[in-house]
Image: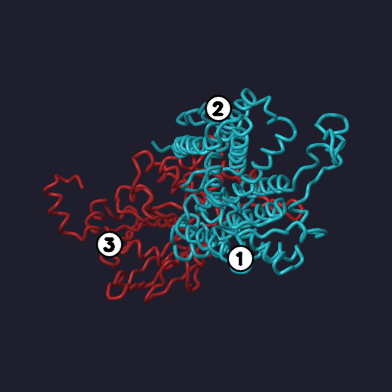
Amino acid sequence: MAETVQSDERVKEISSFRQALIRPELGGIVGTVAVFTLFLLFAFDSGMFASQGVLNWSVVSAQFMIIAVGACLLMIAGEFDLSVGSMIGFAGMMIAVFGVVLGWPMWIAIIITFVICCLLGALNGWIVVKTGLPSFIVTLAFLFILRGFTIYIPQTIERKTIIGGIRDAAEGDWLAPIFGGKIGQPVFQWLGDVGIIAVFERGSREGQPVVDGIPMLIVWAIVIIAFGHILLTRTQFGNWIFASGGDPEAARNSGVPVNKVKILMFTLTAFCATVLAVCQVMEFGSAGADRGLLKEFEAIIAVVIGGALLTGGYGSVLGAALGALIFGVVQQGLFFAGVESSLFRVFLGVILLFAVILNTYIRRIITGER
Amino acid sequence: MNPEKAPIIQMKNIEKHFGSVIALAGVSLEVFPGECHCLLGDNGAGKSTFIKTMSGVHQPTRGEIFFEGKPMQFHDPRDAIAAGIATVHQHLAMIPLMSVSRNFFMGNEPVKKVGPLKFFDHDYANTVTMDEMRKMGINLRGPDQAVGTLSGGERQTVAIARAVHFGAKVLILDEPTSALGVRQTANVLATIDKVRKQGIAVVFITHNVRHAMAVGDRFTVLNRGQTLGTAQRGQITPEELQDMMAGGQELVALEGSLGGTV
């Protein structure tokens, strides 16, 4: 195609460097390389890159990734969701209430929780679309409403804010392992046997590898990233997501169902939050009223590091996933390197500022604004 | 313009009242396939209301619309678009952050099936976009070039090419040249000429007589919600058109003081 096009002498050739710059993932790629280089240099002997260490930061990164994908697609569609963190706490509590307090089979509890949370996400979107209010305000309201219920419900029925016993309730359930299980145990056993990864030297698990499988949380993260990336870049709906965030009025004039797109993206964000919540309660065996605190902001920061514009219409799921990876690696890496963990927040603030400045610059290049 | 041809769209005695304000007081117009019909008028003359009636945004208070000889009622812009009436607005339906090909197919994305799944057919979209743009005389760096990097005139051309590609029979251009420089205006006027030669009826709204004279086959002047008549190309001078638009006398006085530069 490109060879047949005569070039216009007025179109300045842009250097491949600038061309690379306008890829939304650039910030994420650079950041990932920098972060890994740094920790390989300064924390290599700390066990961070041994099998257990890798699993440790992979799980944390995967948690960020799951909610970042939802937040990313929603931000590209031009909206925010500040209720993600509260939704995580709320969804976990719903599982506990249905599965433990009411004693329903775990698979029913999980499915009903998904339905309720997705409907709440859709309600968020519906209110934003119908009232025309900024999603910032609407979802801020839901941040408090959902968190309030998450504390109120267990307080009222159990007189405590943490409900345990989920692991027992999930025993033998067919759906629960999809969220709380592990895959690839035989492979890891073999890796342990041939000595590639460490095995327990004594105790009841002697001879078993220290990492005995990949948690489903990581599998979910990979599946959701792949789904989000293909949806955004390879489908008609993906074009509508970009259009809805880029200029809703222009999109409507061209026949794009902007309201439907936005409501669906709010629903997807709630779905992602629920996936994380279910994986967490299955892992911990309990639901706590304070789960997911501040997660909404961490998701948004990961998305911005990944190159998405806060104003919508531009961004990348892969970028957001890299943003989440940077997060996970730094948060756990500082621990391995023995650095005071409160410095993680300093790092967050600094990197957020850099990412936003870089994105603004990139936006100018793309749109040719001066 | 061929007199044997039937008009593709006829607007008869269109009246539009907004409460107590009479925006249109009986405007008639017919447009033939392959002609460029210029609709001129000063601000507030009713041009916008009139074309919004034609494109289905407003329903006329009184009067009839015939499309391809049949009476038509447009309930909303979708009806008009489905019938083949496309409008390119002053404020374009283009998204600067998106690529030209994504914009070109926005709302009409080509789909490729892989098993039960449907994917955006980027190859097809890119090829068509490059082709259509080349036909209009614009060489893109590539189909993934963002619309934001195009000039105003090029954006107008993308919008026009898009309307034509999706089967417009009547193309309404709402002041496409009002915000453009000289070269860009020339490009848009050249595009209008290309579109007209494909047999598409063009309704060109402008208040710039020179732009109208450059491409127009016929000229209809609106003033205070009424038609001041339709003139053929060659039967009217730019000065006469200018006078009609301004409603006559005031401009004569003005022209004296400005030394004939208006």
Which class describes the residues within 10 Å of circle 1: few (<14), some (14-19), or many (20+)?
Answer: few
Please determine whether, in this image, residue A187 is positioned above or below residue A168: above
Q: Which mark is residue B44?
A: 3
Other-residue count near label 3 (Cα within 10 Å), few / some / many at <14 / 14–19 / ≥20: few
Type of amino acid at the residue the image marks with label 1 = Arg
Q: Nearer the viewer, mark 3 or mark 1?
A: 1
On residue A159, the disc is: 1
Where residue A55 appears, as percent x and y from the top left, is: 72, 38
> Which chain does the cyan colour mark?
A
Mark before the other along the chain sequence, 2 or 1: 2
Q: Nearer the viewer, mark 2 or mark 1?
A: 1
**Left or right relative to B57: residue A3:** right
Residue A364: horizontal and vertical position, in percent?
44, 37
Badge 2 sits on which subunit? A
Q: Amino acid at mark 3?
A: Gly
Q: Secondary structure at mark 3?
A: loop
Circle 2 residue: A16
Label 2 neighbour load within 10 Å: few <14, some 14-19, many 20+: few
Instruction: Tell me if residue B133 can be seen.
Output: no
- In the rendered view, tell whether residue B141 sits above or below residue A123: above
**Residue A139 at x, y percent in the picture:** 50, 58
Q: Quick check: do tags 3 and 1 share a chain?
A: no
Q: Nearer the viewer, mark 3 or mark 2?
A: 2
Relative to the observer, which residue lies in front, B33 or B131? B131
Task: Out of A316 and A135, give the one closest to the viewer.
Answer: A135
Q: CA distance from mark 2 to mark 1?
A: 62 Å
